[in-house]
Image (spheres, rainbow, N blue to C red):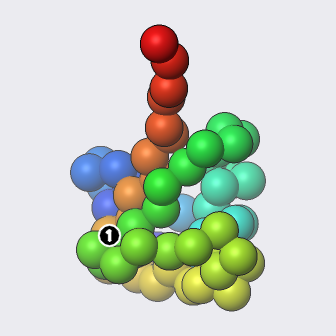
C-alpha cells in the first residue's frame, strides 16, 4: 500500500495495517507521540484498532520537551 507518512511517500507491503503495526514496522518507539490520520487526532488507546489504508495521510510526531 502507498501512504503519506510524515509528509513523505511510503510503500508498505500489504493492504491494511493498524497504527500500532506501522509504528513497529517504522521503529517509532518514543513515549510522547501525537498521531493524526487524515487530519483526525488519534488517541493512544485507538492505535491498535485504527486502520491505515492505501492513500491515507498519517503523521506520527515525536514531542520533545525541555527547559
Number of residue marks: 1
Q: Is residue 64 left or right of residue 13?
A: left
Neighbour tally class for label 1: few under 14, some 14-19, many 20 plus, Cα within 10 Å: many
Q: Is residue 15 visible?
A: no
Residue at x 65% of width, y 55% of height? 23
Q: Is residue 26 left or right of residue 66?
A: right
- In depth, the one of 53 and 23 nearer the eye is 23
Q: Position of residue 16 (x, y in %)?
A: 58, 84
Above or below, comparing residue 12 to residue 40 in the picture: above
Residue at x 70% of width, y 76% of height? 45
Q: Is residue 61 left or right of residue 48?
A: left
Q: Secondary structure at mark 1?
A: strand
Q: Position of residue 43 (x, y in %)?
A: 57, 73
Above or below, comparing residue 8 to residue 30 in the picture: below
Residue at x 47% of width, y 13% of height? 67
Which residue is situated farthest in the top direction here?
67
Q: Is residue 54 left or right of residue 62?
A: left
Q: Is residue 49 visible?
A: yes
Q: Position of residue 18 (x, y in %)?
A: 65, 77
Residue at x 35% of width, y 78% of height? 40
- Residue 57 is drawn in which quadrant? bottom left
For label 1, the residue is 57
- In depth, the one of 1 and 5 nearer the eye is 5
Amino acid at each position: 500500500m502507498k501512504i503519506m507518512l510524515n509528509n513523505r511517500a511510503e510503500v508498505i507491503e500489504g493492504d491494511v495495517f493498524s497504527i500500532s503495526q506501522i509504528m513497529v514496522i517504522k521503529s517509532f518507539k518514543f513515549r510522547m507521540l501525537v498521531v493524526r490520520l487524515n487530519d483526525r487526532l488519534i488517541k493512544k488507546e485507538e492505535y491498535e484498532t485504527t486502520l491505515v489504508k492505501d492513500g491515507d495521510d498519517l503523521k506520527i510526531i515525536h514531542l520533545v520537551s525541555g527547559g
